[in-house]
Amino acid sequence: MNIDWNKTPLVPAIAQSAESGDVLMLAYMNEEAYRLTLETGYAHYFSRSKQRIWKKGESSGHTQKVLDLLIDCDADTILLKVEQKGVACHTGRPSCFFTSVTQGKVIADKAVDTEAIYGVVDTLYHTILERKNSGGEKSWTRKLLNDKELLLSKIREEADELATAIDEESDEQVIYEAADLLYHSLVGLGYREISPDRVKQELARRFGMSGIEEKEARKK
């Protein structure tokens, strides 16, 4: 039985611990990710937020060695039996399934320091998404996400304050204002659900290209 990639270009892929049987995560594979998984023996997925292929653990080192790969009876869902190195979830928990609806609480603690693994920018972005998708306590982040006009006005305000600081104020104030602008920019990315990884990809594309060349390329 083969997957019809023309019919289903993105197929759900469930990762399960071969040792414990715990369901670790759900991601998606396209044909290239599927091929790389089979060729390398390590799980590769297609990230809808990053819009690219990624090897599980490429940043954290928490890889998934594939011991078996199964497809369901309709050939449109994949089950991976994996040997998980480290943790599966970007929150630092062993599994992505740690919120119990019936119990109304988080049932698994963080096992690793995510900031040390992913860096503060990615960790902050994922925290913003958690605020967006949760019904928890009120916060400034949630207020911004629920009020687009306020969010846009704050990004404009912080950009102006950074420009003023660069022109007139101390290095410490420049750093403070830059942090404010970065935070509000990340909330804006979270509002649109655009991963910072895509911004990094765009910067990588521009690397080695002059600003004049880049602007000319936009016009074409």
Image (spheres, rainbow, N blue to C red):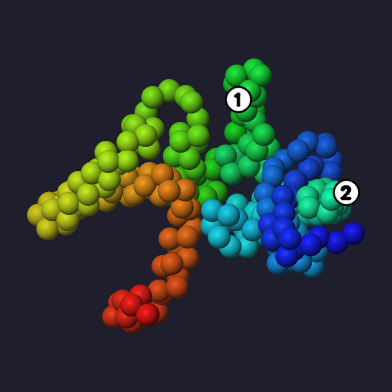
* 150 sits left or right of 106 in the view: left
Name the residue type under label 1: Val
**Residue visible at 34% across and 32% down?**
143
Tell me the amino acid under the disc marked 2.
Cys
The residue under the point 22% across, 49% down is: 156
* Alpha-carbon span between mark 2 and mark 1: 33 Å
| Picture coordinates of residue 103, whole percent (x, y) | 64, 17
In which quadrant is the N terminus drawn? bottom right
Disc 2, SS: loop
Q: Quadrant of residue 142?
A: top left
| Residue 37 placement (x, y as % from top left) | 76, 62
In the rendered structure, the answer to whether residue 128 lies left or right of residue 170 reads right
The relative height of residue 92 versus residue 181 in the rendered view (above or below) is: above
Q: Can the viewer see residue 139? A: yes
Q: Quadrant of the C terminus?
A: bottom left
Residue 153 vs residue 137, the one in the foreground: 153
Between residue 60 and residue 75, name the one nearer to us: 75
Task: Determine whether the residue tagged by mark 1 lies in a helix, strand or loop.
Answer: strand
The residue carrying pointer 1 sits among few (fewer than 14), some (14 to 19) or many (20 or more) residues within 10 Å by Cα, namely few
- Which of disc 1 and disc 2 is earlier in sequence? 2
Residue carrying label 2: 73
- Residue 11: quarter of image: bottom right
Residue holding disc 1: 106
Q: Residue furthest left?
A: 168
Q: Residue furthest front?
A: 7
At 63% from the left and 42% from the top, the residue drawn is 89
Q: Position of residue 120 (x, y in %)?
A: 44, 47
Residue 40 in sight: no
> Which residue lies at the image location 78% right of the left edge and 36% below the top edge?
22
